[in-house]
Amino acid sequence: MATILPTLASDLPKPFRPYETGGFYDEMISADGTVRQHYRHFLKHFGAVTPEEFDAKRRAVDLAFLRQGVTFNVYGDSQGAERIFPFDLVPRIIPANEWEKIEAGLVQRITALNLFLHDIYHEQHILNDGTIPAHYVMSAKHFRREFVNVKVPGGVYIHICGTDIIRDGQGNYLVLEDNARCPSGVSYVLENRRALKRTFPEIFEAGGVRPVEIYPTELLKVLNHSAPAGVAEPTVVLLTPGPYNSAYFEHTYLARQMGIEIVEGRDLLVRDQHVYMRTTKGLQPVHVIYRRIDDDFIDPTVFRKYSALGVPGLVNAYRAGNVSLANSIGTGVADDKVMYYFVPRIIKYYLDQEPLLPNVETYLASEDADKKYMLENLDKLVVKAANEAGGYGMLMGPHASQAEREDFRQRIEADPRNYIGQPMISLSRHPTHFEDEGFAGRHIDLRPFILYGDKTVVIPGGLTRVALRKGSLVVNSSQGGGSKETWVLYGNH
Amino acid sequence: MDEPLHRARREHCPPGGCEPQLLLDFRNLDDHALDAHWIPIVQSSGDEELFRKLHPRATGQSVTQFLVFQSENPNSIISSIGQARENARMVRDQITAELWEEINRLYLFLYSPRALQLWRESPSDFFLTIKNGSLLLQGLTDATVVRNEGWFFTQAGRYLERADKTSRILDVRHASLPARGVPVDSSQADALGWSAVLRSCSAWDAYKALHGAEVQPALVAELLLLSDEFPRSVRFSVRHLNTVLRRISGVHEGRFSNDAEKLAGRLLAELQFSTVDDIFDIGLHTYIDVAQMKLNAIGDALFQAYIFQPFHLQEEYELRQQEEQQQQADLGRAHRPDPTPPA
């Protein structure tokens, strides 16, 4: 095997040689055909693996995931159709210098978002100053009026955030969206890491990769930290919608890793504005709830009246300061697609800084100048409905028919508050293995997980999702998406 | 704190497991004889009505199909393991990873084409695989689970099921017995039948060691119902059930704090202070019937004491399921399809 670190494509291990970047920004190979520095070490070791060994390892990992039940699925009966979330063995590697910028940008972002949420649920300075027109916040689907002036523990709204990041054709990292309600996917990050360590132990050891296994410990710290004041040893629980939810695996996984109880709404009750859980030995007080249930379902006496998943009286207990919720109620306004447009302004307003991680350029149809631009450029833009419950989908300007564009023109005119436009971004690509094609480029994104507690911790890397279908940008698990391991290096190679 | 009670079910050699062997010895049985031979097995799990609906004739083939692979039969092997696995999935945070993997492995095997293939090529190997899978799970549980409340619940379920199943297997032979009174003579066919019962409870060697080679129904009944040393007997199981129930509540063994403990205590006393003559005086089948009702009552009382919550209405249950599924797992949003590469 080569003792030189591969720099030229011709030095690549044989299976990679036919690989083409296709004109996109490629994570592994740069435009001039050289292998990026931070991949060279990996490739050198990877070159020692024969195609047969690789195939065997790939099958072993798939089988291990199936056995462990690291699946997402449709549960109906005891024969539920389960699929493993397809996992590609080639890791996506990020050098330290790039990561440090991403990390700083994410820390900045969550800090600003928390300040923003605190402000709009209290004095609303940012609205009174006119920095954000008030109607955008007031009309946001997830703005919870009932929560104005409610004190939340530590003033923290978003404890756990999953922010989706993409890379454009020039290699710049951009934030695509924040997920500030119940972001999921971290269990895949942890399981993928275990799988890769088992499959390629030598490569891993030599790689200088930052650990991700700290996540459950750090999450528990954040949860404990958020407990109501004066509680010496808070009882923390994880509130799940139940075993029929497609993320149930992650709920049980995290509960076990943290050593906390997992409960459903019916296991809890509220008495005198205090929350208790029913146990075989009677009621036990609960102080912190890591909730994986949306606001709408969390308390049938306040939100959706007929929900069977929530806990009657929970919101009262929360208002009284007797229980903490992570994430807090009302964070949905921060991951609203229209609010996304204002995040750079939010960062500037509260921190007096320019955003370290830029947004994708966005146009708001409710702003006249933007609307004009959007309507004149429907053939170039992607138009999305801001209100995600509106299942009208998206308009892919360059690929849409005249009739489709006309349809969206009308929709925008009718309800401008609910539409945004963005240019189409060519996401970066990464070599991904296919049985018939060998290694081929597929579009990827990244979802890091940020924990906001005593200090802000960003798990190195996060979930890299791959759009497995050729040419597709859809990374959604139910529409042909898969995942990869993400390695953040201690150094730059 | 729902414990995977169904896991315990699979620890017995499935009732049909030893029967294919038996069938080979009776090649010339006609339909009526076949029916008489096989139906008691179906009856033993209370499924005769369902069986008749699904299968026109009771043959070795149809009965074993019904008991092994029939998903419409909730008591079949495939349904039981499916349910056990589903239970395990629900309480995954409380069981060890190894335990989960093994039950999942068994489940995946059973639902794969390999299982059908093995079943056709070699039924005894198939059953051995299932039996060994079950024993492995028991061993893993024993070896790795912390003796906490969860553990005691699994043991309660296990012993309750075991007592029930042993009694059902024993009951399979009741047609060959007089309604009451200790049976005296047994024919060769009978003896083979009773040997099958022993084998189905893994009690063949225990019996031989105690009583020698001659298989007598009264002694079989005594071993399986009243032995305090044989781990699969009803008495042994009920004794352990009593112990673990009280470990859950913290109450002394001679006392009771709920209906489950009260009923279990009574049943134990009865088993402890009976002889096999007492049982045959009542009639074996009658006795077993009553015992099974008592075991059911204990199971219900256990549920009432610890698990029952007053909202189990079917509509609410369905609404919950729907809502759970609706909760969007916030993973993976569509971006945009089909980009054009930059010029």
Image (tube, coloured by chain):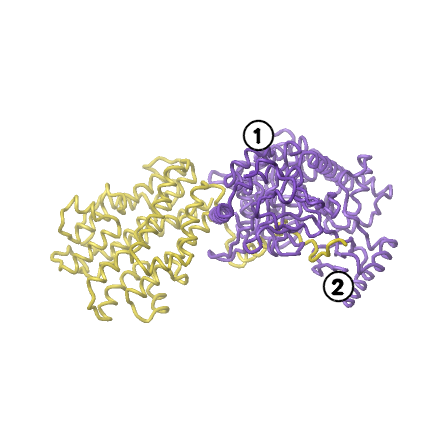
| Residue A456 horizontal/vertical position (percent) | 68, 33
Counting residues from the N terminus, which is met first, the one under dot 1 or under dot 2? 1
Q: Is residue A194 left or right of residue A490?
A: left
Can residue B167 be spotted in the picture? Answer: yes
Q: Position of residue B330 (x, y in %)?
A: 63, 49
Examine the rendered structure and indicate whether residue A68 appears above or below residue B44: above
* Secondary structure of residue under mark 1: loop
| Residue at x-position 53% and y-position 53% | A83
Task: Kindly identify which residue carries mark 2.
Answer: A400
Q: Where is the C terminus of chain B found, in terms of image quarters?
A: bottom right
* Residue in front for this viewpoint, A139 or A20: A20
User: Which subunit holds the residue at mark 1?
Assistant: A
Chain bearing mark 2: A
Q: Which residue is mark 1?
A: A233
Secondary structure under the numbered disc 2 in the rendered image: loop
Q: Position of residue A245 (x, y in %)?
A: 56, 51
User: Which amino acid is tagged 2?
Assistant: Ala
Q: Within 10 Å of the Cα at label 2, are there few (<14), some (14-19), or many (20+) other Cα atoms?
A: some
Work out whether residue A298 can be spotted. no
Q: Quick one: which chain is purple?
A: A
Could you tell whether A119 is left or right of A65 in the image? right
Q: Amino acid at mark 1?
A: Glu
Marks 1 and 2 on same chain: yes
Residue B46 vs A319, above or below: the answer is: below
**Residue A250 image point, x, y percent:** 56, 45
